Amino acid sequence: MKHSNATATTSERRELKVLGIDLAKQSFQLHGVDDQGHVVLRKKISRNQLLDFMAKLPPCLVGVEACGGAHFWEREFTQLGHSVRMIAPQFVKPYVKSNKNDAVDAEAICEAVQRPNMRFVPTKSIGQQDIQSLHRVRSQLVARRTAQTNQVRGLLLEYGIVIPKGINYVRKALPCILEDGENRLSSLFRGLLNELYEEFVHLDKRIESTEKKLETLCTQNEDCQRLLTIPGIGLLTATALIAAIGNITVFKNGRELAAWLGLVPKQHSTGGKQTLLGISKRGDTYLRTLLIHGGRSTVRVAHKKQDKRSRWITDITNVAVANKNARIAWAVLTHKVNYKAAA
């Protein structure tokens, strides 16, 4: 009995050092260990109780998966004195044992956050999340406008009226079609088409308003202004980079940033034989797409210039320019200087 009590006392004195939290909307699973890796906490807690519980814990290392709400909890836990690390879900998965459930996920997060070579997700500030929210809203508005444009073209085709592809063609043609009294459109369909046109104009105004807000934020941010000096990076790409990257010092060099954006070759090598495939397409798809579009615009006009960079661009692909721009962006943000073309 004395031996049993001594063991219990020793267990009670173990101090929590590392805590893994499986985040959700209403219930959270916690898994904590001491400095020797012994389990000292397994607990399921509700959303309303989480902050109070964390406030009572001594400062420790907290690991969470990068998911919905993770940035909010990171800021809250940091204010309570904890050191918080966010991990991408694909890096947590190898530590999940057998069947998957909340308790096993929390244990896997706790194990993954202790690895010395683990890669962590940069934390976003409120300002970064504001910029990212504007981008997400604009992207959705553009998708809705494109879908409506295709719907209008498809409906008019059934009435014998053909509009070429492209938003500008639809924008110019619809008022003329509505005013034309000899195109044999019924009053019912003409009224429906007028409603679609009004909604189309409304979406145009919403998109323009969102872009003006992004432009205002870009003007107020020095790093955004520096990124705009890079050929192939405009308002959308510059603000999206600022929203996604956060602390540029987490990347050791420009290649790490390009790899994080999925702009480097995917490798499948074995036995000393290197096999390089297409780009890995990892990271933020939206940001990578913007960089590639910017690279495409640079390639399109490169033949008109005779400087060293333009001559180099004429012989490469859009993705290669996007990769180069990502590396230049790292240098610009790291050294706090504007881009200057090589002599």
Image: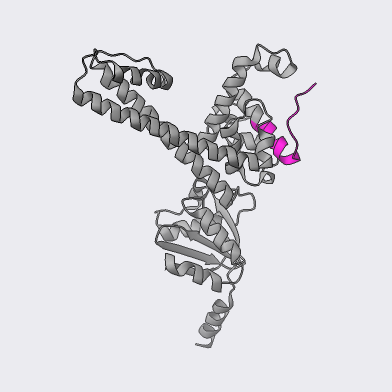
Numbered marks: total: 0
Q: Between 26 and 200, which is closer to the camera in this rendering?
A: 200
Reply above or below: 253 against 148. Answer: below
Q: Could you say where residue 51 lies in the image, as x and y percent from the top left?
A: 50, 68
Residue 206 placement: quadrant: top left
**Residue drawn at the location 74% of the way across and 40% of the way down:** 336
Q: Between 46 and 201, which is closer to the camera in this rendering?
A: 201
Q: Between 253 and 270, which is closer to the camera in this rendering?
A: 253
Regarding residue 40, the answer to whether it shows in the image is no
The stretch in magenta equals 326-343
Compared across the picture, whether 313 is left or right of 50 comes to right
**Residue drawn at the location 39% of the way across and 57% of the way down:** 101
Compared across the picture, whether 283 is left or right of 188 comes to right
Reply above or below: 142 against 136. Answer: above
Residue 100 placement: quadrant: bottom left
Figure quadrant of the C terminus: top right
Regarding residue 74, the answer to whether it shows in the image is yes
Compared across the picture, whether 147 is left or right of 223 comes to left
Q: Could you say where residue 31 lies in the image, as x and y percent from the top left?
A: 49, 64
Q: Could you say where residue 48 lies in the image, as x and y percent from the top left?
A: 43, 68
